[in-house]
Amino acid sequence: MDLQLKGKNVLITGGSKGIGRSIAAAFLSEGANVSVVGRSRDFLEKAKEELGGSLSLYQADLTKSEEREKLIQTIVEEKGTIDVLINNAGGSNGGKTAETELELFYDAMELNYFSAVHLSKLVIPHMKKLKSGSIINITSIFGRESGGKVTYNNAKAALISFTKSLADEAISDGIRVNSIAPGSILHETGNWKKRLEADPEGIQKFVQDEIPAGRFGTPEEVANVAVFLASDKASWVVGASINVDGGQSRMNF
């Protein structure tokens, strides 16, 4: 299916590995101009080597507001505009609430939430000029229900709420904002890979007990939803939080 994304300028945070890398590959296959940002130069270079020379690389620490501002300024100067923003950068830390230092809550919010809020605010004026654009926030099913680490859950829940709020504001300017809530996704650089190697029997039991589809999801399955949401085929999808989880979520919606 031609999603008519050829020539679109796409920015993907956390795009050098895992889900972000697969999202980059999916947009490249649609003929988009793809830029990825990450902290590690080594992972960025590896992504370019594997995905192709047309991929643009940007190294930045998105927990720092000044680096977020510099990133958007640089990309707009080089590319002209940003048509699609994928806020994928994120990670978890800490453990149980009583055992987790308050500083880790701040760190989790800065990486998972405030980076996405700030980048969205920075790209909105450029999208308004064209009366079009798509912002997609990668959240988690554990932003919609209990499970996982508390710092991560809090940040992803906030991001889902932000998605709906911004979506209602931005749609009048032709900008669609949505989020994707993945379940347990297996990839080489992710936590599930490490857990599977450390405790294969325990993790296989988890999969059978907790994921109705009976397997982990793949980054490509998240990426397929991302390119659809960014396209005009999803023109009436606004402010949605879409589970990509093989039935893992226990919610009715």
Image (cartoon, helix red, strand yellow):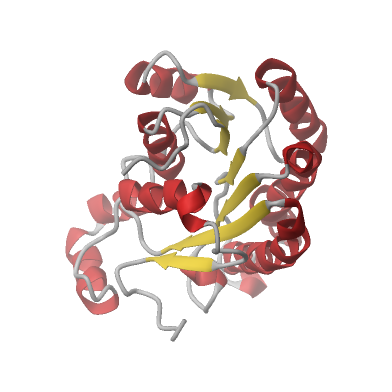
Residue at image x 59%, y 69%? Answer: 150
176 displayed left or right of 125: left
Task: Give the percent coordinates (x, y) of residue 244.
Answer: 38, 63
Task: Give the percent coordinates (x, y) of residue 37.
Answer: 58, 30
Q: Which corner quadrant of the image does residue 104 belong to? A: bottom right
Q: How many marks?
A: 0
Q: Which corner quadrant of the image does residue 19 belong to? A: top left
Residue at image x 42%, y 19%? Answer: 48
In this rendered view, identify the residue nearer to me: 79 or 40.
Answer: 79
Residue at image x 31%, y 55%? Answer: 195
In this rendered view, identify the residue nearer to me: 194 or 246.
Answer: 246
Task: Give the percent coordinates (x, y) of residue 168.
Answer: 73, 66
Task: Give the percent coordinates (x, y) of residue 12.
Answer: 55, 37
Residue at image x 35%, y 48%? Answer: 219
* Residue at the outermost top position: 53
Above-or-below relation of 251 to 122: below
Which quarter of the image is occupied by the N terminus? top left
170 displayed left or right of 21: right
In this rendered view, identify the residue nearer to me: 17 or 128.
Answer: 128
- Residue 108 in sight here: yes
Above-or-below relation of 102 to 59: below
* Residue at the outermost bottom position: 252
- Residue 139 in sight here: no
131 displayed left or right of 195: right
